[in-house]
Image (cartoon, helix red, strand yellow):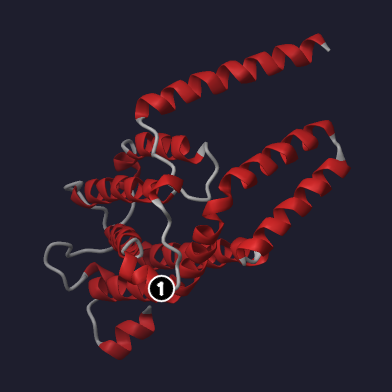
Amino acid sequence: MELIHISAGLPWFWTIVSATVLSRVILFPFSVKQMQGTAALAPYQDEITSIRDEMTAAQKKKDMLAMQRAALRQKLIYQKAGVSMSGMIVAPFIQLPVTLGMFFGVKGLCDGTVPQLANSGFQWVPDLIAADPTYTLPIIATVLMNVQISVSMRDLIGSTPQMGHIMNFLRVLTTGSVFLLANLSSGVLVYLITSISAMTLQSIILRQPAVRRALHIPIIPAHIRQPAPSMRDSVKYARQWWRNKVEEARAAERR
């Protein structure tokens, strides 16, 4: 980041914005690769979900033979779809270190290692080291988190049926994150806002049919898409999940 600041002569505010956008550009091919695999597997989701349920049941029974049979069936489906299982696993793990590295890198700079960040070069956010006393940046970051989650919920193909409910609960949790984000330096919040905005824009762009065709991402038919659950659906799911856990615990006690 300091290299960008020195070589390009950018103020620190725009240095953080530029470095964040650059990191998203570097990760873009991995995002596309993951979407290609997810879209290719979309027609087989019912089979994959059934296999995962079998594997979970076999794991509880410690039936290793049944788990191996289910794993083999899953591998054959991936081969039929032309998707590499290792590629689908590796892509998120490549993106995570870069994202965390950027976060902690910016945080390290703003925690005092670079005093020049106190003069950001941007009038609306003059000091990147200090927290935002107006709460403007934390509120913007929280709103964008909710927008990103809402956008991502339209791309649930390939996810477990529970993922939509998990994302709904994340939306609820993010509403209280304003007070946590208010403790972060303004520079970190600038990074978060830029990163979330870039990811949201990427999701919207990669949803366009012309873009998907150009990048060889299969267009998913509407009937295959999983409808995003409402908050009411998620509350019902949470209640049923709790009842099931209570019944399982009671059944275990009776054994």
Position of residue 15 measured from the top left corner of the image (x, y, whole percent): 29, 76
Left-right relation of 124 to 56: left
Q: In the rendered image of this protein, does residue 58 appear above or below residue 223?
A: above
In the image, what residue occupies the spot 48% across and 63% down?
35
In the image, what residue occupies the spot 24% across and 87% down?
9
Label 1's element?
helix
Position of residue 77 measured from the top left corner of the image (x, y, whole percent): 67, 56
| Position of the C terminus by quadrant | top right
Can residue 182 be seen in the rendering of this structure? no
Q: In the rendered image of this protein, does residue 8 appear above or below residue 13?
A: below
Q: Which residue is mark 1?
A: 23
Most foreground residue, 119 or 153: 153
In the displayed orientation, state which residue is furthest to the bottom: 7
Most foreground residue, 100 or 23: 23
Can residue 45 be seen in the rendering of this structure? yes
Most foreground residue, 81 or 18: 81
| Position of the N terminus by quadrant | bottom left
Left-right relation of 195 to 159: left
Left-right relation of 179 to 236: left
In the displayed orientation, state which residue is furthest to the left: 123
Position of residue 79 measured from the top left corner of the image (x, y, whole percent): 68, 64
